Amino acid sequence: MSNYGAPGGYEQPRAAGKATAALIVAIIGLFVCAPIGGVVALILAGQAAREIRESGGRLTGESSVKAARVIAIIEIALFAFVVLGSIIAIVVLGGSDEDLDDVQPTPQPKIVLRAYVVEPAGA
């Protein structure tokens, strides 16, 4: 009789690799490359959820998939908020060039160079 594995050929459930990868990408993407990491994490989380569902109990990691999705959605929403806020700030604070029409240019100092030719005495 073998001591390997569980009796009856039952295999211990293991974590889905893509679920872990989705969580890692979501966390790192939050600090490194916000929108890209979030999108990649959502894609990986979807693939991992499908693999877990189709595994028939052999794969686990549903909580990692949910956490990755939540972090990725927050990441994408924060990025969109920053972009939208930047656009609004540029429009509101940037103003138009109408304010610049009243500004007089600063006078530049005039530089005059004079050259004197001195001829030697007795030439």
Image (cartoon, helix red, strand yellow):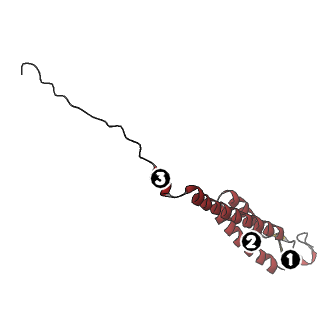
Q: Secondary structure at mark 2?
A: helix
Residue reaching furthest to the top? 122
Q: Are marks 1 and 3 in contact (CB under 8 Å)?
A: no
The picture quadrant where one finds residue 69 is bottom right
Tell me the residue at 68%/56% (across/down). Answer: 31
Q: CA distance from mark 1 to mark 3?
A: 69 Å
Q: Nearer the viewer, mark 2 or mark 1?
A: 2
Circle nearer the N terminus (2, 1): 2
Residue type beneath disc 3: Leu
Give the SS element for disc 1: loop
Q: Which residue is mark 3?
A: 100
Disc sitting over residue 45 in the figure: 2
Separation of marks 2 and 3 at Cα, in angstroms: 52 Å
Vertical comparison of 98 with 50: above or below:
above
To which residue does mark 1 refer? 57
Q: Earlier in the sequence, mark 2 or mark 3?
A: 2
Residue 5 in sight: yes
**Image spot of residue 13 (x, y percent):** 86, 72
Residue 21 visible in the picture: no
User: Are the residues flagged by discs 2 and 1 in contact, CB closer than 8 Å?
Assistant: no
Where residue 91 sits: x, y (%)? 58, 60
46 over 37 or under it: above or below:
below
1 vs 3, front mark: 3
Q: Which one is nearer the viewer's eye here, 116 or 71? A: 116
Q: Earlier in the sequence, mark 1 or mark 3?
A: 1
Q: Which residue sits at x=42%, y=47%?
A: 104
Separation of marks 2 and 1 at Cα, in angstroms:
17 Å
Q: Give residue 70's position: percent from left, percent from top.
A: 77, 66
What's the residue type where badge 1 is placed?
Gly
Type of amino acid at the residue the image marks with label 2: Ala
